[in-house]
Image (cartoon, rainbow, N blue to C red):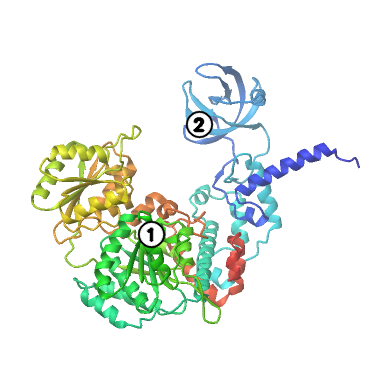
Amino acid sequence: MAQEPAAQRGRDDTAGSQLERKLQRLGLREPSDFVVHLPIRYEDETRIHSIGAALPGRTVQLEAEVLFSEVQLRPRRQLVAAISDGTGRMYLRWLHFYPNQRRQVEAGKRIRVRGEVRQGFNGPEIVHPRISKAGEPLPDALTPVYPTTDGVSQPVLRKRVQQALTQADLSESLPPELCHRLGLPPFAEAIRTLHAPPAGMSEQALLEREHPAWRRIKFDELLAQQLSLALARRRRRSQRAQPLVARDTELLKRLRDALPFPLTGAQERVIEEISADLARTFPMHRLLQGDVGSGKTVVAAFAAAQAVASGHQVAIMAPTEILAEQHFNKLSGWLVPLGVRIVWLTGSLTPKQRRQALESIAAGEADLVVGTQALIQDKVQFPRLGLVILDEQHRFGVAQRLELNRKGDRVEGEGEHCVPHQLNMSATPIPRTLAMTFFADLDVSLIDELPPGRSPVITKLVSEARREEVLALVHREVLAGRQAYWVCPLVEESEALQLQTAVDTQQWLVDAFPDMKVGLLHGRMTPAEKQQVMEGFRLGSVQLLVATTVIEVGVDVPNACLMVIEHAERFGLAQLHQLRGRVGRGSGQSVCVLLYQGPLSMVARERLRAMYETTDGFEIARRDLEQRGPGEFLGMRQSGQELLRYADLQSDSAIVEEAREAAAWMMQNHPDSVRKHLQRWMRGREDLLRS
């Protein structure tokens, strides 16, 4: 046999390695990866349509003779051809083309054409059609179309998938009784159906993912996620934490007696749940959810008091200095009179203040440390950190959350490694299906009751054309002794968006209200400037505060009962709800005015309608999830949790429930099946299998 030239082998090897790198960008390395790389849609190439019946907007496959083809230079260089099958004429157009495409459509040739019909200037046309030989045998089933990347063609993907189906292990990963109970088809049958649909199968059922084969795949994906979270939870429970049992129960009693308000039933319930967690020998990992104004900070105070009373330190980290300062002020007012030593640590401290804070923390003199991301810097050393509290935890990256937790890692007694307990707080309610899918490894506590005396905020939608009425409302409220916010989306002028800015708006309002003190707060001010403005607003010397979204979380001024949000159509739904939560904190009736500029897009209209129709944070979150999807809603990909490829949280909520129940059952009764299922669906997360 003749030896293949070395140069040719080198070119083939290079081409092969380039293809492999591109496939790896799609996550395709092993045959098992190709098996679960499923089509995004299907093309019906099983029949030939007639030109006369081809309607705009439909994808068709035609066989016809080329009447003419030419390169036109106006309005731009393009290749244009016309074909006919006796029932009508169709134009073909290429805005970019190669010499071989010109040869494919030479006059007199008979060709097969596929593409979407649209109405062109001269009649029906197909732009960038796919051309093949006329008369070739037609497939008898739908043709799959796969997610791909530049340089990986559909024929290459189809070939590699078909090879994988003969090489990969397609044996069942679920116990037979589970498949029988849920009416699930076998995995191998479902996979082969989706990669190569049998002749006559409904394209609609496949496209809408309602076919039983799709149901099996979505169940498998959700089950793998539930199992991975269950293993993460099991691993956490195998870790060791110091039980935080209060040596001085008097501190908790005195805190309760010192509060100027009674706790709600929901707060009492949540405090009990957290207290029980802190007393355990494995680390608490709890998510505390509560709508804006529900009283999460006082719950955090009780958790901190229990940790301090057990002889340990507590760290509370907030994403912004304003929110951190709010916590510091509240907690100081409740705990300092009881003898708890609280330290403030942010990036705005002077070198001397910072050195004193670090020394106090390292010496164990600081019982409670409140701050921003300055808490995770290397020089911050906690000798006995027992509890970490993260507020608005979704605003921190995974690495930041882990870094603060590591501050409490230490070796106890007989070489036993201990980690601190962790409490995550969020005022962004998480819809039930999202909580079950992405936060199933957390224990969840919910404050579902507002403190007494709070009235729901009235929301008004007001067009830009009625701005003078809004000004009159602001003036009336301030004259009555109340305060107001005026929120703007930008600090300085943006030519692209042409939005009203905070700086300009403050000047405009100063001119409009010469008898009123108008303050300004935005993210580019120094911490000292922000603190001065906020102090003036809290004390009432500033009556109207013009601000950007820096006030979205952490600002609590009970006398502020009116908020105007400029260009409300530009804000996200969760952000609008958070902003609205800054009012309604006193006993009086509060109003939030959403000042919008038309015309509104459909998405903006839906957002404003949701804000007008409900103040329920969970309903707001549900609609926000519908509009944005889980990836954007979460703000980031959760550590080790791949966002769903095939299941949909809205339409597949029943499957989420089934997967959750099945995961618990399999963990208990079929550990071997758990391992096999995760090996198929969670490749790259082999660390889970070592749990």
Q: Residues within 10 Å of mark 1 (few under 14, many from 20)?
A: some
Q: Residue furthest top?
A: 73
Q: Which residue is mark 2?
A: 117
* Left or right of 1 on screen, residue 44: left
**Mark carried by residue 354:** 1
Image location of residue 248, percent across then percent down = 32, 82
- What amino acid is found at the position of numbered circle 2 in the picture? Val
* Left or right of 243 on screen, residue 677: right
The correct choice, above or below, for 604 with respect to 71 in the image is: below
Q: Residue furthest right?
A: 1
Q: CA distance from mark 1 to mark 2?
A: 68 Å
SS state under label 1: helix
* Left or right of 596 on screen, residue 159: right
Q: Quadrant of the N terminus?
A: top right
Image location of residue 268, percent across then percent down = 28, 75
- What amino acid is found at the position of numbered circle 1 in the picture? Arg
Image location of residue 141, percent across then percent down = 61, 46
